Amino acid sequence: MKISFLLHNVYGIGGTIRSTFNVAGALAEHHEVEIVSLMRTAEAPSLPLHDAVRVVNLIDLRKGRASDADNPLLKQITPRIPAAEANGTVNFNALTDERVAAFLDATDADVVIATRPGLLIYLAEFGRGRGRDFLRIGQEHRLYETHKPALRAACDAAIARLDAHTTVSEADAATHRAKLPDITTRLVGLPNGVPATDVEPSDGTAKLVVAAGRLVPVKRYDLLVTAWATVAAAHPDWKLRLYGRGPQHAALRQQIDDLGLADHITLMGPHAPIETEWAKGSIAAVTSREESFGMTIVEAMHCGVPVVATNCPHGPGEIIADGEDGLLVANGDADAIAKGLLSLIEDEDRRRRMGQAARAAAARYAPEHVAAAYEKLIGELYAARGQAAPSRGASGARTQRKPLTDVLKATVKSLVRKPPLRPVATCRADGRGRLTLSVRGAGVHGPKLAVTLTDRAKGDQFRVPLQPPAESGGAWTAVVDHELVRLAEGRWDLHVVRGDGARRRLACHYAEGRGLVDARPLDGTPFTWWVPYTTVDGYLALRTWYRDAHAEARTVHADDAGVTVTCTLHGTTLAEDGTGAAPTVIAKPRTAGKAFTAPVTVLGPDRFRFTLRHEQVHATRSGKESVDPVWDVSLQPGGDGPASLRVGRVLGDILDRNKTDLYPVVGGVRPYFTKANNLALTCPKRTA
């Protein structure tokens, strides 16, 4: 059969788009599937979409194109869609009225599925088609009670005119049935489809809790931060990472600073794909006031991570089997959240068992299972009409056979022409820092296939042969080892080079850093550290550090007296009493001002602590700086080691510490990490 999904904008990255793409792709294995995008705002969708799913655009708003951007109907208010929907982040207007009505009048689809309130209102009003009565199905991706009264009333009226309406939880389906007892529309709970991942799952050993989502009030991350004060007091070696962006960022940053948790909670910003980050954690935290479904819960479970979630309406309680594959705690209760987290932190065997159970339980949300549920619903709806569901096969582009002569011509042409090279890689870092590359893609074959690593600044290049797959259809692989390849400090781009001279930059599927979270560098000198990452334009790259020795800032604490830093030393040792000059830390100004020193408290041959006092910082300022003064912090270890080495934070999986490891201004001084992840102090003028 032919199935059409109505989306407002295929080119975004929201949860409704992700779930629609997942289920549409699964349905496309057996049916002809299209996604109709009300708006077109980009050249191609941001999220991956099954190649058999066709995208149809109704309104083109791309800049610099012969588009609809100047159409006067865009500015005309629609009387059909309530203002809460029409004037929000999604825009409905007279032009959307016109284009959707024309599409629904002409479509040859057997089923049309509307994915948000404005679209299901359109589907109810315009969805009769010319000479054909297709099935009309609405979807609710939020909760019944969350819509404003005018929009709620319009949706209720529209739902009554549809064949079926689905919610993403059975609890919300029950709410719809209770609120709409007199309608004949089928009201069904069908979850979102969340695919399994091929990321290496968590092993439950990292002392890390992960949370991810929009930084908005409904997520109640303020409760999570409050709870973490209790967790950090009991287990200061455990850390919390919070991924996402949103309007609550500044308030959460202030709360973290006020509670003195800057070295315990990291606001990571947005990250895609998020699967690599779930897999780094041993526990996931979801503290929402309400959830229509909980895609993040299922994503974390797919990665083998048990979830501690508030038992809020409606999703978590339907997804998590409390005590088996995760924990449900009291909604809105920071103490309950802390207690749930501590129970798993303090029982490694239990969280590992839960992680394994979570991964198995998440399989029921696979898109193919959700697609099968939609097929069943569609079959039942047609049966209620006294009809059999149409059977047209999958997309014609996938099933139509080409004439044999065309196939032969294409084969000969491909033998004459060099096949294009479009490599895609997954890069996995292990606990010793070695990188394993798995490379697939068009044109990845032939003799002398290799990966090259090129220093972005200097142009230096290393070549690593790619080994052929062990079985047909497998990936080509290469291992890049610290002990065999010495890369200078910097950033490196990766390319695949083929025997015929073709060379193409490696697109990145996943850059997996789970093995780096708690890893330690190799003993001896030089100190080397590598972090693979995905560039903003989607390519695989590598950041490297290479130093004779390195002082790693493990903790940084700012109080009224000064900035206290505890460090571990790699590649050298500290001078003990009687073996030479005592170790010292020196803070050197970049421009005006004076350097100052601080004594070092030796905690062992490779551990030490020091405090840079605020009074020293202010006493060595010139007072004439045109910009905020900066002092770079270095260690002079004494003895026979290097004369001086920078203090920094390099170890782990985080690429740019200056974006994540942030500290408050205390006593007019703020510690921070530079673009090279080295420790520095600044004295912002606005707080001086």
Image (cartoon, grey):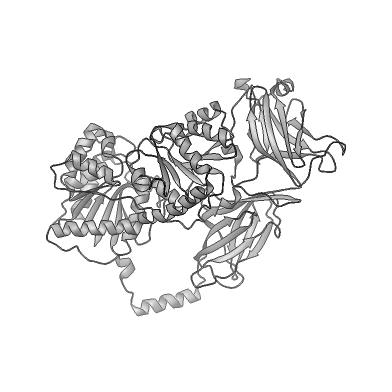
Q: Give the quarter of the image for residue 436.
A: bottom right
Task: Assign the N terminus to one quadrant of the image.
Answer: bottom left
Say which of 128 and 148 sits in front: 148
Residue 39 in the image, given as x and y percentages of width and height: 32, 46
Q: Is residue 594 above or below residue 159?
A: above
Please tell me which residue is depicted at 35% across the width and 79% down the height of the picture: 404
Question: Is residue 195 in sight in this rendering?
Answer: no
Residue 566 in the image, given as x and y percentages of width and height: 69, 35
Say which of 477 and 65 sits in front: 477
Task: Assign the C terminus to one quadrant of the image.
Answer: top right
Q: Is residue 435 left or right of residue 278?
A: right
Residue 608 in the image, given as x and y percentages of width and height: 73, 36
Question: Is residue 412 in sight in this rendering?
Answer: yes
Q: How many marks?
A: 0
Residue 325 in the image, given as x and y percentages of width and height: 42, 49
Q: In this view, does 605 lie to the left or right of 178?
A: right
Q: Is residue 170 left or right of residue 261?
A: left
Q: In this view, does 460 lie to the left or right of 188?
A: right
Q: In this view, does 200 lie above or below 322?
A: below
